[in-house]
Amino acid sequence: MPLNYASMEQVSGWRFLWHRLSVAVGRWNVRLIHDPSKNSQAAYLVGFVAAGLVLALCFVLAWIRPVGQIGTSTILIDRATGARWVKVGGVMHPALNLASARLIVGQAEAPKMVPMGEIRKSPIGPAVGIMGAPDDLSVRTPAQTGWTLCDRLGSTGSQVIPKVTIVAGPPTLGDWSQMMRSPQAVLMTYAGDVYVVTDGHRSKIDLADKPVTLALGLPVGDLHPAPMSRAMYEALPPTAPLRVPEVPNPGGPVAFATAKLPLVSGSVVRVQDASGSDEFFIAIPAGMQRVPATVATMMLNAGMGNGGQVLTASATEIASLPQATGFDVSIYPATHLELLDKAAEPVTCVSWRKGSGEPQAQVSTISGRRLPIPVQDDKRLISLVTGGENVADAVYIGSDAANFVQVTGVEDDSPRRESMWFITDTGVRFGVSATGNNDTDTRKALGLTEAPQPAPWAVVRWLPAGPVLSKEAAMVEHDTFAKDPMAAPLPAPPTGDQP
């Protein structure tokens, strides 16, 4: 009996019936208004289309930029070892660092990773570049740049040599470190001289000058100035010495003296203001000058004016007399000094800060039990191995500290704009070469396109100096490398710690 083959219509109808039965069992409905099979079909279609697009994109990218081929790249990285290479005149040279490679090729090219087999297809030459130059050339431009130089005393005494630490980035203050504001001050000594350090400056004082020390409330015979490092001495802006102001023709007559107010040059006059507080004036030939109580006391202690006597006048009488300025009194504290105990607070710092767009910097002094850095960042303090009298003992680089800087003066209004430096995360400064007044070629090659941030040279100079970053310095071949005479052995990690 011959076989009766089913027609396509019969097969389609059979499939439809089975599909309808399965939908009826699964969805309790045979109307097939929302057919779930169509969803899976659409998903398959979308998946196939997406896969096709991805394959096409990969094909195009492989044709445009073939992976593992050098092409026109001149700075390369061995994919297996991470070693850097630079192509110069068709010859492959091992590059000591990214800075050297970029300076040699003259552009801030990103390295391309290739297999070593591709590199070996070209002739191999000696190693080239600047020893110790940086690999990380990313620039940080914080909203506020800060530089702080600190003296740390291990113990007290005149023979103690302070340890100098540089803090890059704004200082972190807290109960461990606070800003000094007058009348708070520290007595410090350097090269046989004594200085009052406060409000971001140092003022020389003679402890044997009793009229001055008594006026400032300094105890006689019980003063122990803390030693000051040369770095701190040079970083602190100086003021005129704290001494009894010089008055023209002391004791001589003044034209505005009256019978009721027998003034002479150097007379001290006390006046009560509307609140009942005492104000003091000094008579000078040009008129009456307002002074703080400490200066008035100095004049009295020195026997100036009317035999060391204070004259009393009303506000009306003073207002009727000419006013003048004969000497600067801004450096004198308004009241007795409050000396901080350096045995309890062994850290003294001078801090320089400047915000973006601010016309002037802020210079302040800091005192505390420890450095003005976050407590958890003590382990990030780097002990410098270079040593010597011209380098700091340690450095701390904040996570957002400016690292491409142009040095200026430590004064808050310094107009200086001098050399540029790139500072690594290990605290080494590298000079950025400039030919005449044109430094754009070097900066462009290194990728330092951002404007440099200001930094005080009086602080930056104490960082260890690396070689200058220039094309001429990078275009050097090496067979071997000389031993670093300043190298120090790496301390072994504590037992149980990972290396």
Image (spheres, rainbow, N blue to C red):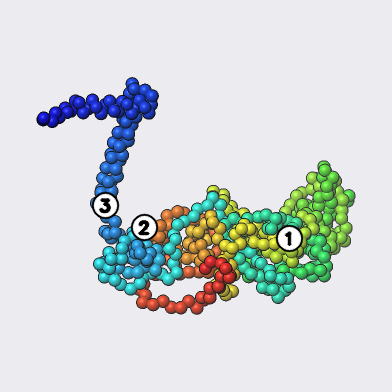
Query: Which amino acid does the dot numbered 3 rest on?
Result: Ala
Q: Which residue is mark 2?
A: 110
Using residue 380 as the reference point, say whether residue 257 is left or right of it. right
Quadrant of residue 32 within the rendered picture:
top left
Query: Which amino acid does the dot numbered 2 rest on?
Result: Ala
Contact (Cβ within 8 Å) of mark 1 with mark 2: no
Element on which disc 1 rests: strand
Indicate the position of residue 228 as horizontal and vertical percent values. Answer: 67, 69
Q: Which residue is mark 1?
A: 185
Query: Which amino acid does the dot numbered 1 rest on?
Result: Ala
Q: Which residue is mark 3?
A: 62
Callout 3: few (<14), some (14-19), or many (20+) C-alpha neighbours within 10 Å? Answer: few
- Which quarter of the rendered picture does the N terminus lie within? top left
Indicate the position of residue 133 as horizontal and vertical percent values. Answer: 44, 67
User: Who is closer to the viewer here, 142 or 338?
Assistant: 142
Which residue sits at x=79%, y=61%? 216
Of all residues shown, which one is farthest toward the front? Answer: 1
User: Who is closer to the viewer here, 325 or 380?
Assistant: 380
